[in-house]
Amino acid sequence: MERRNKAVEALRSMLPILLIAVALTGVMIGVYALLGKLTGKVLLGALLGTAAALLNFAVMTFSVVKAESAESPERGALQVRLNYVIRMLVLAAALIVALKTDLFDPVATVLPLCFTRIAIFISEIFRKKEAN
C-alpha cells in the first residue's frame, strides 16, 4: 500500500512537468506554423519526440519509486542503472527511426527531448515560489 501511495505521489508531482513539456511542444509547433514550415513530418516528429520524452520521464520516475522499496540500497541502485540503460536504448532507437526514415522531421523529434528538462526547471521555479 505504501508503494502505491508513493506511486500516486510521484504521478502527482510529474503531472505539471508533463503538462509543461506538452505545452512547449505546442509552442514549437506554433513556431513551425508561423515560419510556414509546418508539415506532416513536423507533426509526426513532434509526436514521436514528445511521446518518447514523456514515456522516458515517467518510467524513470516510477523506477526510482520502485527502487526505494528494493531489498537493499545496492539492489535499488542496480535497478535504477539497468533501467537507465534500457531507457537510453529506447530513446536512441526512436531517434534512429526518426533519422533513418523519411517520416519524421529530425529537429521536431529531438527538441521535445530537451523540453522535459526545461519543464523540470520551470516546475521547480513555481514550486519554490509556492514554498515561500
Image (cartoon, rainbow, N blue to C red):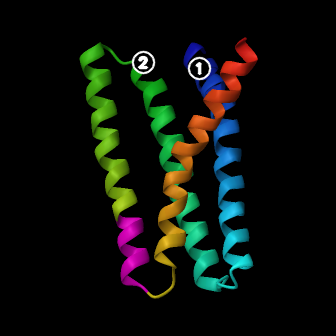
Can you give x and y, in whole percent of width and height, for residue 125 in the image? 65, 28
Which portion, as a residue range, is magenta? 93-101
**Callout 1 amino acid:** Lys
Side of 95 where 65 appears, left or right:
right
Q: Could you tell me which secondary element the residue under label 1 belongs to?
A: helix
Q: Residue 57's mark?
A: none
Give the residue drawn at x 74%, y 77%.
Answer: 34
Which residue occupies the extreme front position in the image?
35
How far across and how far down the image is residue 58, in percent?
A: 54, 41
Q: CA distance from mark 2 to mark 1?
A: 10 Å
Number of numbered markers: 2
Q: Which residue is mark 1?
A: 6
Tag 2, which secondary structure? helix
- CB atoms of marks 2 and 1 within 8 Å: yes
* Residue in the image at 55% along x and 47% along y: 116
**Left or right of 56 on screen, residue 72:** left
The C terminus appears in which quarter of the rendering? top right
Residue assigned mark 2:
68
> How crowded is the residue under tag 1: few (<14 C-alpha within 10 Å), some, or many (20+)?
some
Q: What's the amino acid at mark 2?
A: Glu
